[in-house]
Image (spheres, grey):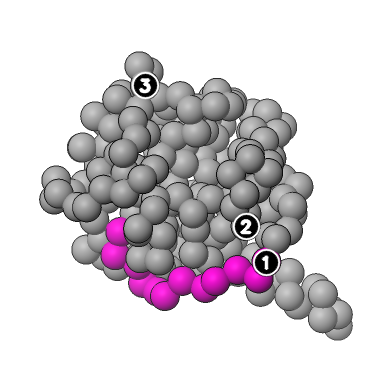
Amino acid sequence: MPGVGGLIISMFALHAGMSNDGPICDSLTFVSRSEWGARPPKDPPTHIGHPVNMSFIHHSLSPGACFDKEACMKAVRGIQNFHMDTRGWNDIGYSFLIGGDGRVYEGRGWDIVGAHTLGYNSVALGFCIIGDYTASLPSDAAIQAAKNVIKCGVDKGYIIESYELFGHRDGGYTECPGDALYHLIHSWPNFSRRKIPKHRA
């Protein structure tokens, strides 16, 4: 019989999206926080209300794109360190990060309020594709994984089916997610051209 620690880890893994919940979710390879070596949050996290009605796409800008698991885990650790140590945030800001290898790296996950899009963190999930997409596009594997992880969230009931998809720049004074990626997501399901208030990025 598993101990309390094992049960807590199992419950966290389930909420993080690593259970099998249909073909879209099954197609994804999630890398858990423990697997990529996440630091614990500074303070107890705040839980988000489900389902959320918005999703925001980001790019990391730096570090650049990664194309294998080891490089992507190193990139995610670097992003977490930057968010916690330089920006002073509680944890890595994004809900999930997507590598050029097509894997989905758990950030704050489905259940925790993020720090990705000021003014919208309590009603949205934030998905970051690792790399700089100002002038070039992510890998095909990253693009497909990003679209699929959002659909997985819908299938699991974490995101409403009629959600609105935005780029970070739609809700903040920033160039994120880069011109090339921002142009691409105009063709993704549920992309919204609605004008929403912008906040400091």
Q: Secondary structure at mark 3?
A: loop
**What residue sits right under mark 3 in the picture?**
134
Magenta range:
43-54
Residue 112: mark in rendering: none
Q: Secondary structure at mark 1?
A: loop
Q: Quadrant of residue 124?
A: bottom left
| Image position of 25 with respect to 45: above or below | above
Task: Give the x, y percent position of residue 92.
Answer: 60, 50
- Which is nearer the eye, 77 or 188? 77
Does the segment drawn in magenta span residue 172?
no
Identify the amino acid type marked 2.
Asn
Q: Residue at x 76, y 47 (%)?
A: 37
Task: Give the x, y percent position of residue 155.
Answer: 38, 65
**What residue sits right under mark 2 in the picture?**
90
Task: Give the x, y percent position of residue 131.
Answer: 50, 27
Q: Quadrant of residue 138?
A: top left
Q: Are marks 3 and 2 in contact (CB under 8 Å)?
A: no
